[in-house]
Amino acid sequence: MSAGGYADGEALGARTLAGFTTRQLRGMCAVAGLSGADADIYAGVLAECLGPVAGRSLDLPPPNRTFLSDDHTPVEFSLSFQAGAAPALRLLTEPGCGADSLAGNGAAGLAAIRTMARRWDFATDALEEIRDLFLPPSPQGPLALWCALELRPGGVPKVKVYLNPSASGPERAAATVREALHRLGHRRAYAALPEADGHPFLALDLGDWEEPRVKVYLRHDGLTAARAGRLSRMRRGPGPAAIEEFFRTAAGRGPGTTRLSGRPGLTCHSFTDTGADRPSGFTLHIPVRDYVAHDGEALARAERLLRRHGADTGALTRSLEVLTGRRPEDGVGLIAYLALAHQQNRPPRVTAYLSSEAYAVRPPAGRAAQRPQAVG
């Protein structure tokens, strides 16, 4: 057992799902400046979130075909950077990944969130208010419930829940989001959203947040830099030029290359004040892995963005080294997304979303897929 009484994932062996991912997590904690005691606690939390599949051998296929990552590892890491500050480490998991149905997946995920709420003494009222919309008896779609943890010093994380607006069918997704916002008190929020091609997620902040957010994610097919620059609905948000510049750098799109022809871009619109008619936050997510030949190119783009926003690039380079033993040029998808986030009255943040690659490495152009190498 690790500090805090959780099952020790590393004790399950490096070739198990928990052993592999908790070892990565410990390395990521060191990169983010968290203590060894914090790393022990968070590794135990991750192993517990994986539930019955924690001890599953990596020689077996993934426990399900999770939408969370390209190789179906139910774990993703991210580092969020601001000028003059240490990077913030986040962990995304699918607590119900071992269930044999999507309904069971959602039930296991809800149980995991309720356990966290009792352990860390936070309310789940907002989640319970909209539970029937997103966790119906016979859910549809690619996911039921994901849990994100922002890992802080002291062993008590900030908690976020990601839900599927298409749970009652994709044709109901927009109505589901509208009804959820209304129930949560944001009655003017839906009308403030820009046009989009889909509603992939709705997210809730639970627990110790200064300003808990309701976050609506939108999908934008064939997105261009000019269109991206017009998607923010913040009253005092980023100007179009700043968003277009991020789009072009992250996606590798010059003035003569416009649309995203692969995986679509996503935007996130955050609402904090129920009386406001505009979102308080805006984020543009670019699936960089679909627009590079290999992770060396993705890393170079990320470093340019970090330098442009006054953030140190060293932590990102070190994080890749603790996640994998391979060279960035030998695969693509280790850096899955790059995002630029703006929140009212705060400096912008650049976030890199990082894959575990526990099951497979997506090859660069012209090479066959490969098993992951040992964690560095």
Image (cartoon, grey):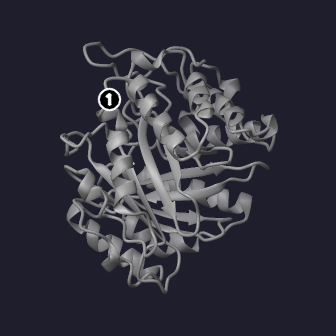
- Indicate the quadrant containing the C terminus: top left, top right, bottom left or bottom right: top right
Residue 342, position as x, y percentages in the image: 49, 61
Q: What residue type is labelled 1?
A: Val
Q: In this view, does 286 lie above or below 368?
A: below
Q: Is residue 320 above or below residue 238?
A: above
Q: In this view, does 212 lie above or below 90?
A: below
Task: Between residue 76 and residue 341, name the one nearer to us.
Answer: 341
Q: Is residue 351 left or right of residue 301?
A: right
Residue 251 at least partly seen = yes
- Quarter of the image for residue 206 reads bottom right
- Quarter of the image for residue 70 reads top left
Q: Which element type, helix, strand or loop, lies under badge 1?
A: loop
Residue 237, position as x, y percentages in the image: 44, 68
The number of numbered badges drawn on the structure is: 1
At a point 55% along the width and 26% down the height, the residue shown is: 320
Q: Is residue 8 left or right of residue 226?
A: right
Task: Between residue 111 and residue 238, name the one nearer to us.
Answer: 238
Q: Is residue 265 above or below residue 53?
A: below
Residue 23, position as x, y percentages in the image: 65, 27
Task: Between residue 161 and residue 223, name the one nearer to us.
Answer: 223
Residue 74 at least partly seen = no
The residue that label 1 is drawn on is 292
Residue 77, position as x, y percentages in the image: 54, 39
At a point 39% along the width and 63% down the height, the residue shown is: 239
